[in-house]
Image: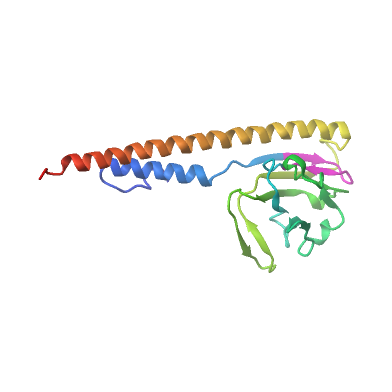
Amino acid sequence: MTFLHACPVTTDNMLMMCVFYQLISRLCFVSPVVEINIRLLPQQTATLPCRAAKDKPVVTLDWSRPDMSPEVVFLFRDNHVDPEFQHPSFRNRVDLLDRDMKDGDVSLVLRNVTTADSGSYECRVFQKKSVPFHWKTRRSKRSVMISDPIIIIKLQIVHSGPIDGNKEDQIIHNMKNWNLAFEEMDVREYLTLVSVLAAVVVLLMAMTRCVTRYWSKRPSR
């Protein structure tokens, strides 16, 4: 649906205001999602990268696999790891790359991978003074965070062919590439903010124009 189709109004001024309202809504509530593909051999260690905003305490960190039930891979909330609803296959195999989550690093380490670990992993983070979220109870009777993921990791465990490897130098190389992806996401978010501010300015100008026309057309007493 285009902006115009979403704005069934008649006057030009009202149409302009509606168009910019739709623009602001989409810019504010649609955030970019980074997707990364990782290929590994069985029994290797997978590092699933995810980075939150710096200098903001992490209230909730939710790593999940939507195709599993329960879908929890790793859950951190209320200042501790919550294993209650974690899928049994991930118990004692996952941990944070940096338990202090320094500089917003909420990457996950998955040890001794198998072909059953192939799938899409989603990282969701809620921080103080960040985008609001809400909780929803699913069939597993678990309260989960409902928001767009920061990143989606598509992990593929193969027995042959090119892989990303798990050596320390390879991990460092991959982390540099992943950080570049996150930096590009930060730039897009900055441009989104600039676009929103510009849209607000134009909207205010349109509203001012409407008010001016209204008062100028009123008959003088």
Q: At x 72% / y 44%, what residue is drawn?
A: 154
Colour scheme in use:
rainbow
40 in magenta: yes
128 in magenta: no
Residue 139 to residue 66: above or below: below
Note whether residue 40 is visible: yes
- On the rendered structure, is 209 left or right of 73? left
- In the image shown, does 168 or 44 lie closer to the viewer? 168
Q: Residue 67 occupies which quadrant of the picture?
A: bottom right
- In the image shown, does 116 or 169 lie closer to the viewer? 169
Q: Residue furthest left?
A: 221
Give x and y (percent) for residue 76.
Answer: 75, 55
Q: Residue 174 occupies which quadrant of the picture?
A: top right
Quarter of the image for the C terminus: give it: top left
Give x and y (percent) for residue 38.
Answer: 77, 40
Give x and y (percent) for residue 141.
Answer: 68, 69
Q: At x 80% / y 51%, what residue is drawn?
A: 117
Q: Residue 72 occupies which quadrant of the picture?
A: bottom right
- In the image shown, does 6 or 221 lie closer to the viewer? 221
- On the rendered structure, is 49 left or right of 45? left
Number of numbered markers: 0
Give x and y (percent) for residue 163.
Answer: 82, 36
Note whether residue 12 is visible: no
Specify start and end residues of the magenta stretch as a single range: 37-50
